[in-house]
Image (cartoon, helix red, strand yellow):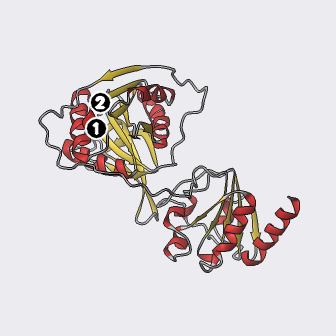
């Protein structure tokens, strides 16, 4: 039986003194988990000269900010961050620690879990608190973390429970959790607890000389209108129609995994369990059959219009409006109609 009483922690990822959006998504879920467990939400803030960011974390739902401020943590290096975070976990004994499934989180989370010998579930799409009974021993565990994620290429959804090794740790995909809404009991302030980095005498084998960024022009998560295409679009050339429609609507273009695998669009445009999760005001789905993997990434859209030649395509089950027809005929008519209204 679980007797843990530690906090629920979120690794508050920051870079260059700016918090990542995933930190607020995770705080929203952490608030839900912590309220069910009757414990506090802790945000772990690491870096150099970053204490001022604590106020944003309180506004995002944190009760406590565990601050480790050290010049050695100015830029992310695995060994420095890992060593400091492992010592912090040993000192404070949280019962749950969650990271974003970002480049930083996917690097740091597993290495911390390995050092603590506690395990970690990667790329979760949901987290819930529940009970668990070991079928082999009959032992019962209460209020443990149910870590939910796609498996076998997204063909099934697996629920993973780690009831005997603490803390329970997971990385969570970007875009699948909702930040707390303003006016929903969010705190204006909380406690900032300062901790030692324990890095004195620790040799960090890497040095960051320069950071070169590739700026992406694709922002699916921030787009209110998305036109998405699948294998049914037929070719990369046909995808230009989707770009034309998105342009007249002021939206962005996305794609299913099948479209990406076929080379019709870039990977950064992929929507679904192995891509990004989006919640636009309007989703126009073109030539997408509606596999479970894709639906999981877009079914929370406020309005879904599906265009497909197959009247029995699964996409029509989640669509608010369906058009059975050839997108090469339908989309030009849509563009013409939209322009005529402009």
Q: Which mark is residue 73?
A: 1
Drawn side of residue 334 relative to residue 2, left or right: right
Which is nearer the N-term, disc 1 or disc 2?
2
Q: Dot 2 lies on which element?
A: strand
Mark nearest the camera among 1 and 2 is 1
Occupied quadrant, residue 153: bottom left
Q: Dot 1 lies on which element?
A: helix
Residue 22, position in %: x, y? 46, 43
Occupied quadrant, residue 336: bottom right
Tell me the residue at 25%/33% (across/down).
89
- 123 or 74, nearer to the observer: 74
Tell me the residue at 49%/66% (across/down).
267
Residue 254, position in %: x, y? 59, 63
Tell me the residue at 35%/46% (across/down).
170
Q: CA distance from mark 1 to mark 2?
A: 8 Å
- 167 or 63, nearer to the observer: 63
Does residue 260 appear in this view? yes
Q: Are marks 1 and 2 in contact (CB under 8 Å)?
A: yes
Does residue 4 appear in this view? no
* Residue located beneath label 2 in the image: 68
Which quadrant is the C terminus positioned in? bottom right
Placement of 192 over or under 296, stated as above or below: above
């Amino acid at each position: 039986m679980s007797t843990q009483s530690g906090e629920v922690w979120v690794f508050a990822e920051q870079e260059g003194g700016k918090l990542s959006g995933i930190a607020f998504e995770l705080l929203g879920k952490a608030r839900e988990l912590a309220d069910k467990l009757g414990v506090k939400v802790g945000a772990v803030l690491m870096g150099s000269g970053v204490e001022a960011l604590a106020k944003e974390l309180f506004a995002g739902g944190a009760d406590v900010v565990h601050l480790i401020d050290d010049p050695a943590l100015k830029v992310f290096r695995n060994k420095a961050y890992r060593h400091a975070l492992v010592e912090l976990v040993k000192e404070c004994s949280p019962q749950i620690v969650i990271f974003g499934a970002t480049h930083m989180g996917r690097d740091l989370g597993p290495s911390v879990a390995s050092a603590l010998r506690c395990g970690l579930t990667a790329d979760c799409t949901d987290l819930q608190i529940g009970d668990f009974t070991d079928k082999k021993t009959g032992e019962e565990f209460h209020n443990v973390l149910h870590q939910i994620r796609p498996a076998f290429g997204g063909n099934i959804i697996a629920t993973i429970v780690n009831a005997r090794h603490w803390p329970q740790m997971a990385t969570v995909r970007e875009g699948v959790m909702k930040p707390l809404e303003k006016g929903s009991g969010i705190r204006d302030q909380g406690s900032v607890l300062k901790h030692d980095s324990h890095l004195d005498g620790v040799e960090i084998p890497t040095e960051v000389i320069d950071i070169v960024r590739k700026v992406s022009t694709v922002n699916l998560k921030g787009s209110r209108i998305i036109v998405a295409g699948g294998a049914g679009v037929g070719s990369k050339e046909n995808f230009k129609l989707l770009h034309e429609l998105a342009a007249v609507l002021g939206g962005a273009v996305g794609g299913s995994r099948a479209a990406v695998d076929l080379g019709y669009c870039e990977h950064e445009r992929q929507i679904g369990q192995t891509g990004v999760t989006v919640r636009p005001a309007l989703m126009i789905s073109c030539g997408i059959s509606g596999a479970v993997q894709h639906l999981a990434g877009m079914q929370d859209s406020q309005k879904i219009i599906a265009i497909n030649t197959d009247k029995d395509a699964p996409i029509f089950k989640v669509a608010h409006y369906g058009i059975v027809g050839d997108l090469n005929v339908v989309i030009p008519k849509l563009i013409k109609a939209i322009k005529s209204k402009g």
